[in-house]
Amino acid sequence: MKRRFHIYFLVFFISLFHVAWSQDLSVTGKVTDKSGNPLESVSVMVKGTSNGTKTDKTGAFKVKAAAGSTLVISYIGMETQLLQVQSNKPVVIQLTEKVTAMEEVVVIGYGTQKKSVVTGAISSVKAKDLEDMPVTRLEDALKGRTAGVTVASSSGQPGSQSTVMIRGITSINNFDPLYVVDGVPVAGGIDYINSSDIESIEVLKDAASAAIYGTKAASGVILITTKKGKAGVLQVNLSSYVGTQSPARKLDLLNATQYATLRNESSIAAGNGILFANPSALGAGTDWQGAIFNNSAQIQNHELSISGGNDKSTYFASFGMYSQDGIVSSSISNYKRFSIRINSAHKINKWLNFGESVAYAHTKSQGGFDPNGYFGGPLSSAVNLDPITPVVITDPSVIAQNPYANHATSILRDDKGNPYGISSIVGQEMTNPLAYAKVQNGNYGWGDKFVGNTYLEIEPVKGLKLKSNIGADLAFWGNESFTPIFFLSTTQSNLTNANFNRGMNKAFNWIWTNTASYTRSIGLHNGSVLVGSEARNNSGFGISGTYIGVPASTFGDASMNFSVPTTNTQAGGYEYQPYNISSLFARLNYDYNGKYLLTAIVRRDGSSHFGSNNVYGNFPSLSLGWIPTKEKFWPVNNVVSYLKIRAGYGVNGNDNLSAFQYVSTVGGVGAYPIGGQITTGNAPLAPANPDLKWERTTQSNIAFDAIIFKDFNLTVDVFKKTTSGMLMQIKVPGYIGAANQPWGNIASMDNNGVEVELGYRKKVGAVNLDLKGNVTYVKNKVTNIGANNYIAYANFQASSYEVSRKVVGQPVNEFYGFKPLGIFQTQADINSYVNKNGGLIQPNAKPGDFKWADVDGDGSITSGDRTYLGDPTPHWMLGFTVSAAYKNFDLKVFAQGVAGNKIFQQLRRLDITTANYQTKALGRWTGPGTSNDFPRLVDGDPNGNFSNPSSFYLEDGAYLRIKTVQLGYNLPKFLLNKAKIQNLRVYISGNNLITFTKYTGYDPEIGGSGGGWLFGIDRGIYPQARSFMAGVNLTF
Amino acid sequence: MKYKPLLYLLLIAGITQFTLSCKKSFLETAPKGQVLETNYYQTADQAYSGLVAAYACLGMEADNFGNNTYTDKLGSLNSAGDECYAGGGGPTDMNFWQVWNTYTLSAAVGPQADFWAIDYAGIYRANLLIEKLNGTITGLSDANKARYIAEAKFLRAYYHFELERLFKNIPLITKPLASSDWYSVTQAKPADVYTQIEKDLNDAITVLPSVILPSEYGRVSKGAAMAELGKVILYQNNTARMTEAAAWFEKVSSSGVYSLLPKYADIFSPANKFNSESVFEISHSAAQNAGWGNWPNFSGNIYVQMTGPRSYSGPIYWSGGWSFNPIIKSFATAMYGDPRYGATVANIDSIVTATNGSYVKGYQNTGYFEQKWAPLAQYVSTTGQQELNFPNDYIEIRLADVYLMEAEALVRGGGSQSTAQSYLDKVRARVGLPSIPATLDNIYNERKLELATEGHRWYDLVRTGKAATVLSFKGFKAGTHEVLPIPINELNNTKLVQNPGYN
């Protein structure tokens, strides 16, 4: 079925763009490089037609063309040449190599610019950098490739978004960059795009370049340009890979004997009895992680594209299919995506262009558990469950007992009909993860996303372009979930009614942009002016319904066609609050002889998120550049053959907050039964803040780009970014009685940093070597939090103690807690830990307990003894790629890492006394001299050894990861030519092969999502997979 | 110039859009499903829904104000007293209850943050309504307006009293706070708080109706306000004012509105909501058909779910209980033989033996469970999530409590001993017990038995000074544990001062 679709697709597009041509002369010739070596597979096209051919391995070609027509001879990496056909006399064409990267064109927002005259900090990733790399998500394509861009996986759950951060945490509010795809700002992730559809990705890092996007550009902008067709012969491209994934690491948890031994010890220490009479009889017990991990989870990706056209119309169409199983409980953790794209551009006549791009993607994902949470889910259960309970119960005498006997119809069973083990030791949300997976089976989330734009461009006078572009991002998503009758444990059960829930949501964003640009050169003065206006609107809604008591026992049988009494149907819904933005903007680019450069931008945005006091925000920027190597005084030399110095300053904004926070609105705040009727109460939702205004980010950037020693490309950027008036919800005192927390312009923060990118390209003998590396250093500091002393962040399990704080002078969300000074080895140690009055600082401590630092010096250990413990945000980020090509072989190694951060690891549930431990606990204190860093175990934990948030939980988060190793082989041309294949490359690739780290959790790569939630806090994160893939890239 | 039409088209588009971009109305949008506060509180319906919002905080068991935790006052108080343990699945399950059970509360760990947030939310909503009702309300009669204000004042007094007796040193808030005042608030003297509470209740009493129609069950009556006022005076422990307290109780007792139910066990049945003994009742309902998605705005009574025996099988109880608040053996023993024992204590061990059932023993299991709040099988909801839809109400003040408080006030204030005796006798006679002398000890003991597990015991122990002795087995320390710590987050950036012993 799928194959048939491919064929229809192909036929459709071929017929759509088929253009007839006339044939006159038969032109023959030969194409060589400048040394006269024949060039193979050079495209030779008759201009204005789709008629053309390619050179063979002797460089020869033969093509039919009308006299007077023009041949377009093009080849990757070479300057394109034009040749007028006069006779059928053989011709010899010499192609010259394109000059270096500096002549590349980069996308700068509402236009393009030659890289040589760019003054902002823009990093660019081109198609060729991506096409050989099997990336599972588009954000990953950016990982480690450009300085200043941090990409951290928020979890290994298939389909989950990565955290992308440009130049540090720009704002507490939200540091997600703005994604703009072909001029359309796209919400909710960019995973709908096939990686082989991408022509280029540009990252606008500094304010001077991002200012053109004003609003929402404070955290940087990622511009994605998709491929357009090129005039020439029809080109078909297929890239595919299949692979297998496995967990890179398991946690070391206690086995049954060790567990029983430690639990006995902990119970006895609390004055209670022995729990397990004979621990060694329990043996190794159950490996819950082994039960849920999949060591051969499948991953595959297939992308097919067709492109071509003539000088009037070009097209690019693609189809993609991606499927990935998760490595944790794969039956409820997987992801599938199907995508289609059609881009085309039409030159109606000399002055009128028209084009459009439309993409559609369907996604389906299963992942019904928190990938970094300790409230249940297979991973959390595997970490916390006791190793004594077996996975499956086979002993009939146990099955005859409760809870198996009295819940015989609602317990879950394996394929052989044996009940899954139910722990009588560890309860609450922790359940047998295999049984849990069965309860969740079939439940899934889906998405249908359309992103498209269409434009009309007129060039009435040479250099003047008027363009109108309408873009839309339409997304539908929802879920299907069935809750059968089940009994997983005494607290996790559904005993009466099976429920079926279905929900769907829709979001629609449109954007209409009109621009006028004029480009003109007078003598050595080159100038370009752009003015534009833009309007945006967001809307959406969601609705969900539940049928309670559906007569079905499996997801497959559940349906809303069953009728249930209306009292057993529940429905809910919501709508987006209206949200509009309107903007005016202008940009001036000027250079003198490509030597002195200037870019000036101003943008004015109005947002409905602000009241009449502050509707509009102005965002100016200015950047300057100078290329001294172009000056006469610069001697011709090989040390610095090219140098560009640039500096910029600009302002960006952020209006990321809920609507109508500048006024007080009244809505439902709870209900009360009156006269037996549930009656809704209405009250103000949050105190109003009429002075709410844009969050402002100003950024200065000084940089240089250089070519040194001929083969090295070096770019160094130094930046200072200041975000002020950060929009966030204020945690107001409870005595105010507000239902929700109001928004305010609260805090300010600095991010200062240096980025260095170094590239080296050289042909060493027969080996083409290409090395690229980048290092970023960013230092974050909170400079103001208004009237607050501090802002607390993320609770430590079941306490009101926060894990981290925002406070002036410290990095954002620095970990905060108690500080152990070691462990009391003897009662004498406790007795000698005295305050200035001679009293014991920890009178209730026992040997084996932590000796807490009396930070505030008040002579006792209180909540005031907490202090700053470490920074969750990496200071150093590093990425490097080594590419080497030898004859038909190519090898790529890509590595990436971070340093300077701490991870707060809280995997074990503290409110479950009986939860399992990591093997670290075997090194606990058991008597004088046994340990000075892992305290004794005692039920109830009276000294707060574990229940106090402390540096005990902090670990070094530095890592260096060999992200990808790939070996490719290009099949020789002489073989391919026979099959009319232009290019065929096969490769094998391994991802996440080795990670160098001291971190003891699953994965040191801990991203946040949704504005920094849980940054650096590991609650049992879904680990990333180690994967091996084999793939093929085919072009014909 | 053949392209002129297109050029014009584009120019028009540009101009239109330019105009649109500059047009303010494009940016001035109206909220959907919410009403600007400035446009609200203008009709009778809107005023009523504002009143309901103030009532809604009465029934909240889970916190909707940033803490996002389930706490519930009754479960917490029962965990703290000598009637029950915290129980549950383990020594840290429902940790806020556990730490009150073991008196290892700290400013960061305990149930206080939820109590604080919910009661102050109620105060804000009452204050706001009182302020808004000063304006013109279309369609609201003067009588109803006066009644709404009276109810709001009752609620403001009630929430303040809850806070006062839990925390002692609290801010007194009598109007919505302007943002300029958010951080300058200080704790009031307890005497000032009490003065305001009494003033509000006195105001309410003059307006509130004596009898509440069935269609209004859940709203407060004159009797409720009078009983509450008597209780507020009683709690101030001022012997000179005991006569005054007794007089308010007497107005309730002799109002003719209330009478003791003949059968003690009937008082707590969901089938007998707002019965003749109920003076002030906090209502719950299964009609919400709540699912977990309703968190934390549940109308059902979740505490009922919490107290059920764990994994019970048998005919009487719901099978999915979570075994919280098992009754302490010594308390069960003290009640054993009392006619009220069976309606108060469920001896699950003997029940499962008799009915050939079973249950799983939870943490701190004693075999004794609460019967007044037991999740009886017949009241398990057939719609919504069963755990979340028990319909049982709480009776905050019932007539027997009023009788006993009046007897206490009379004895302490040197009032009519015979009247005190008659009320103690009535309470005992209802369950077939003979008269005993109306001494303070006997009255307190009667309170213990009559009102067991109804949320009064811990307060009674504290206000009578017995807590340190009676609760020493749980770790109660005199001078600290009479009140809860001020929630740690309330000290951030504010002028509030922590209660002694909790620093």
Image: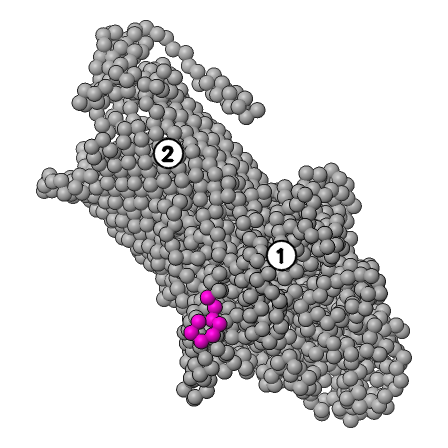
* Residue A686 horizontal/vertical position (percent): 56, 61
User: Is label 2 or label 1 in front?
Assistant: 1
Residue A407 part of the magenta-drawn span: no
Which of A921/A187 is in front? A921
List the residue tagged with mark 1: A389
- Rendering quarter of residue A201: top left
Q: Quick one: quadrant of the C terminus of chain A?
A: top left
Q: Secondary structure at mark 2?
A: loop
Q: Chain of mark 1?
A: A
Please report the residue visible at 77 percent of the width from the left and 41 percent of the height from the top.
A563
Q: Secondary structure at mark 1?
A: loop
Q: How far apart, in angstroms, are the residues tagged by discs 2 and 1?
A: 47 Å
- Horizontal side, residue A530 vs residue B250: left or right: left
Does residue B481 sit above or below A1011 in this rendering? Answer: below
Mark 1 crowd level (few <14, some 14–19, many ≥20, 10 Å Cα) = many
Give the magenta-colored segment's residue range. Answer: A923-930
Marks 2 & 1 on one chain: yes
Please report the residue visible at 50 percent of the width from the left and 82 percent of the height from the top.
A843
List the residue tagged with mark 2: A132
- Rendering quarter of residue B395: bottom right
* Residue B154 horizontal/vertical position (percent): 71, 73
Could you tell me the amino acid type at mark 2? Asp
Does residue A240 sit above or below A641 in this rendering? Answer: above
Q: Quick one: quadrant of the N terminus of chain A?
A: top right
Please report the residue visible at 43 percent of the width from the left and 24 percent of the height from the top.
A306
